[in-house]
């Protein structure tokens, strides 16, 4: 019941996603995180004319073989559900992969903005 109630609380959602991101980051090494961020930037550059990044954005792995460094990192990212590989080595980010990179770029979630309707703040302003 507590999980159901918390599901509608934005702060609980941010806390849960932060924990999830840190669990994922513990599973990744720096080169894999770098590859995820690099791939994200490649997609962002490809789609600069559009607003945001579509989950269906795809980038090709034009590297030589399936066992090269980038392919190895992408395979690990795919194991964790951060990217997926379609036919002909076409890679696309997952929602979770995009959210993780955005989380890293922001340096976490922004601090919660003060609530103007908070009774404590109303009392301190009138004093």
Image (spheres, grey):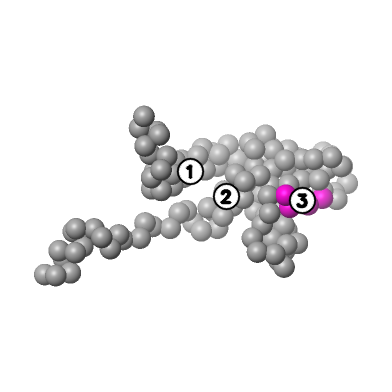
Pick the quarter of the image with the N terminus. top left
Q: What element carries label 1?
A: helix
Q: What element carries label 2?
A: helix
Q: Nearer the viewer, residue 95 or 1?
A: 1
Is there a contact, CB below 8 Å, between mark 2 and mark 1?
Answer: yes
Percent position of residue 97, x then y: 62, 46
Q: Which of 55 and 99 is in front in this view?
A: 55
Q: Magenta-highlighted stretch: main secondary structure?
A: loop
Which mark sits nearer the N-terminus, 2 or 1?
A: 1
Does 35 lie within the magenta span?
no
Give the class, few, some or many, for how many residues have Cα within 10 Å of label 2's Cα (few <14, many ≥20).
Answer: some
The extreme left residue here reads 127
Which mark sits nearer the N-terminus, 1 or 3?
A: 1
Percent position of residue 104, x then y: 54, 53
- Left or right: where does residue 122 sit relative to residue 98? left
Q: Give the range drawn in magenta.
A: 56-60
* Residue 22 visible in the displayed image: no
Residue 82's image quarter?
A: top right
User: Label 3: which residue?
Assistant: 58
User: Label 2: which residue?
Assistant: 99
Q: How many marks?
A: 3
User: Label 1: which residue?
Assistant: 17
Q: Which of 113 and 29 is in front in this view?
A: 113
């Amino acid at each position: 019941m507590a999980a159901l109630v918390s599901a509608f609380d934005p702060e609980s959602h941010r806390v849960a996603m932060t924990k999830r991101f840190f669990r994922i980051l513990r599973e990744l090494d720096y080169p894999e995180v770098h590859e995820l961020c690099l791939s994200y930037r490649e997609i962002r550059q490809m789609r600069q004319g559009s607003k945001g990044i579509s989950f269906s954005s795809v980038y090709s792995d034009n590297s030589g073989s399936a066992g090269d460094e980038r392919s190895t990192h992408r395979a690990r990212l795919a194991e964790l559900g951060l990217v997926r590989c379609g036919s002909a080595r076409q890679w696309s980010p997952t929602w979770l992969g995009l959210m993780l990179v955005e989380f890293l770029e922001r340096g976490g979630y922004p601090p919660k903005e003060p609530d103007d309707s908070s009774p404590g703040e109303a009392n301190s302003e009138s004093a």
